[in-house]
Image: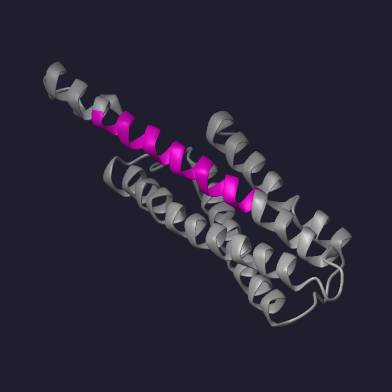
Amino acid sequence: MRARYMCVPKHVWAVYTRRMLWVKAFHIVFVVSWFAGLFYLPRIFVNLAMVAPGSTAERERLLLMARKLLRFSTLLAVPALGLGLWLWLGYGIGRGPGNGWLHAKLLVVLLTLGYHHVCARLLKQLAQGPSRHSHVWFRWFNELPVLLLLVAVLLVVLKPF
C-alpha cells in the first residue's frame, strides 16, 4: 500500500499510519471485550438450565445478570464493528488482490453477529420459562465463540489467501 503513496511526504505518512494504528488498537480492545461477553453469557445459560424448580430468586438473579451482560456486550459490539469498518473502508485494509482473508473474516464477523442474535433469542426464551435445552447443550453452544475467535485471529495474522 505504501507504494501508492510514494509522493506523500514521510511526516504525513507517519501521521496517517499512527492514526490507523490507534484505530486498530481500539478495534482489537472492543472485539476482545465483545467476545468476553459472548464467552460468559452462555455460561449463565448453563446455570439457568441447572436451576432447581421453585428456586425463583436464583433464577431471577441469573436472568438479570444475563440481560445486563447481553446489553453491555451489544454496546461493545457496535464500536468493534464500526472501527473494523473504518479500517476496511477508511484505511483500505484488506483491499486489493491477495486479500481473500478479509472476505473470510467478514464471514466470521457475520457468523459472530448471528451467534450474538441467537444468544439474545435464547435469553428471551429462558425468561419465559424453563429451558428447552439441557445444561450440556449450552456447554457445547458456549464453545462456538471460541472457534469463531480462533478462525478470525488466524485469518488476520496468517492472511492465508
Q: Does the magenta stretch include residue 108?
A: no
The residue sitting at the top extreme is 10
Rendered view: 134 above or below 156: below
Query: Which residue occupies 36% across, 51% down?
Result: 85
Query: Which residue occupies 71% across, 58% down?
Result: 44
Confirm whether residue 97 shows in the render.
no
Residue 86 position, x and y percent, is 31, 47
Query: Which residue occupies 72% across, 52% down?
Result: 144
Confirm whether residue 123 shows in the render.
yes
Query: What is the quadrant of the C terminus in the image?
Result: top right
Q: Magenta stretch?
A: 19-39
**Quadrant of the rendered image containing residue 53:** bottom right
**Quadrant of the rendered image containing residue 136:** bottom right
Q: Along the horizontal axis of the image, is 37 left or right of 82?
A: right
97 or 158, which is in the foreground?
Answer: 158
Residue 28 position, x and y percent, is 45, 37
90 or 22, which is in the foreground?
Answer: 22
Query: Which residue occupies 76% across, 50% down?
Result: 143
